């Protein structure tokens, strides 16, 4: 199984829940997940969002003024997960 997706982190649980609600309201199917151990940023919750919905999700969160702390691009093969930080200009670090 191979999957690519984005992980959004937040400075607080409140912001993570607000983001989930805003994205669910727009039918984007966000998943609240525990912060992956490979990522050391923000609160203990993060949101997993599909590649197809990422751009729209970020636009919605900006419009709703829900601040995202960091964004990571994830590649998962079986149980192996690799996370790469995304900068504000969209570049993978």
Image (cartoon, rainbow, N blue to C red):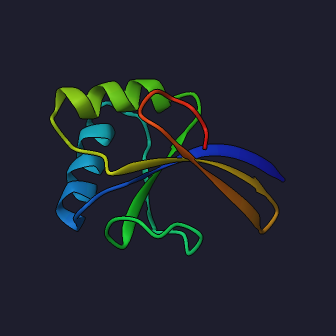
Q: Is residue 18 above or below residue 54?
A: below
Where in the figure is residue 20, as x and y percent of width and height?
30, 49
Q: Is residue 50 above or below residue 74?
A: above
Where in the figure is residue 48, as x and y percent of width and height?
49, 51
Give the left or right position of residue 91, taking residue 10 as reference.
Answer: right
Give the left or right position of residue 48, taking residue 76 as reference.
Answer: left
Q: Which corner quadrant of the image does residue 55 belong to?
A: top left
Residue closest to the eye, 37 or 88: 88
Q: Which residue is drawn at 52% across and 66% down?
A: 39
Q: Which residue is drawn at 27% across and 47% down?
A: 19
Q: Residue at x 73, y 47 (%)?
A: 3
Where in the figure is residue 6, as x and y percent of width and height?
54, 44
Q: Is residue 81 above or below residue 4?
A: below
Where in the figure is residue 28, as x and y percent of width and height?
42, 35
Q: Which residue is drawn at 15% across and 36% down?
A: 65
Residue closest to the eye, 40 or 63: 40
Give the left or right position of residue 25, taking residue 81 as reference.
Answer: left
Q: Which corner quadrant of the image does residue 59 belong to?
A: top left
The C terminus is located in which quarter? top right
Q: Is residue 66 above or below residue 89?
A: below
């Amino acid at each position: 199984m191979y999957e690519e997706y984005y992980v959004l982190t937040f400075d607080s649980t409140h912001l993570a829940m607000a983001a989930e609600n805003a994205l669910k309201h727009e039918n984007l199917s966000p998943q609240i997940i525990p912060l992956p151990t490979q990522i050391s940023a923000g609160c203990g919750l993060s949101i997993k969002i599909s590649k197809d919905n990422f751009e729209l999700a970020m636009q919605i969160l900006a419009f709703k003024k829900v601040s995202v702390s960091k964004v990571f691009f994830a590649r998962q093969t079986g149980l192996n997960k690799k996370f790469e930080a995304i900068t504000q200009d969209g570049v993978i670090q």
